[in-house]
Image (cartoon, helix red, strand yellow):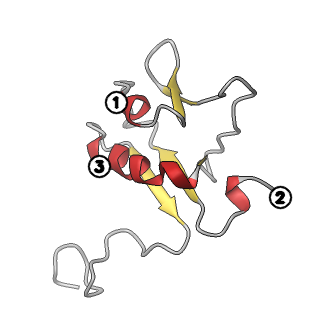
């Protein structure tokens, strides 16, 4: 296996297609990773070659240099339709103390 997906510390972008309304902000924030289809929904950028495979289960591989921009896109998505999965990251919903988001954990 080669490419971004096989590297340690790889990150993958996931889209909740039921929440996405095709506003296109993610493509503005990730120009080297995402393009838009004619209706404004995100597509992987082909960069002149074939588009990377975007698997529903695995997500779209994000190059290491684009991870900070991907984090920003996740935070700024108006429909909260993006999720970034980073290898070695803490599970979502857990704070530094290990308690749930509500603090009652």
From this viewpoint, which residue is outermost toward the top? 38
Is residue 41 depicted above or below 79 in this figure?
above
The quadrant of the picture occupied by the C terminus is: bottom left
27 up-or-down from 92: above or below: above
Which circle marks residue 75 in the picture?
3
Q: Is residue 53 left or right of residue 104?
A: right
Q: Position of residue 101 (x, y in %)?
A: 22, 73
Gap between marks 3 and 2 measured at Cα: 31 Å
Q: Quadrant of residue 50?
A: top right
Disc 3 and disc 1 in contact, CB within 8 angstroms: no
The answer to which of 83 and 11 lies nearer the viewer is 11
Indicate the secondary structure of the residue bearing disc 3.
helix
Few, some or many C-alpha atoms within 10 Å of disc 3 (few <14, some 14-19, many ≥20)? Answer: some
Instruction: Count up the numbered dots.
Output: 3
Residue 55 picture quarter:
top right
User: Which residue position holds label 1?
Assistant: 25
Q: Which residue is mark 2?
A: 1
Quarter of the image holding residue 43?
top right
Q: Earlier in the sequence, mark 3 or mark 2?
A: 2
Q: In terms of sequence position, does the residue under pointer 3 or pointer 1 come before the other?
A: 1
**Which residue is painted at 26% across and 36% down in the image?**
78
Mark 2 residue crowding within 10 angstroms, few (<14) / some (14–19) / many (20+): few
Q: Are marks 3 and 2 in contact (CB under 8 Å)?
A: no
| Numbered disc 1: secondary structure | helix
């Amino acid at each position: 296996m080669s490419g971004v997906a096989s590297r340690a510390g790889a990150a993958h972008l996931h889209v909740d297609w039921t929440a996405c309304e095709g506003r296109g902000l993610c493509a503005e924030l990730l120009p080297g990773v995402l393009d838009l289809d004619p209706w404004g929904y995100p597509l992987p950028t082909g960069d002149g070659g074939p588009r990377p495979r975007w698997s529903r289960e695995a997500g779209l591989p994000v190059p290491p240099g684009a991870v900070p921009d991907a984090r920003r896109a996740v935070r700024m998505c108006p429909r909260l339709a993006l999720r970034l999965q980073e290898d070695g990251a803490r599970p979502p919903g857990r704070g530094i103390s290990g308690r749930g988001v509500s603090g009652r954990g």
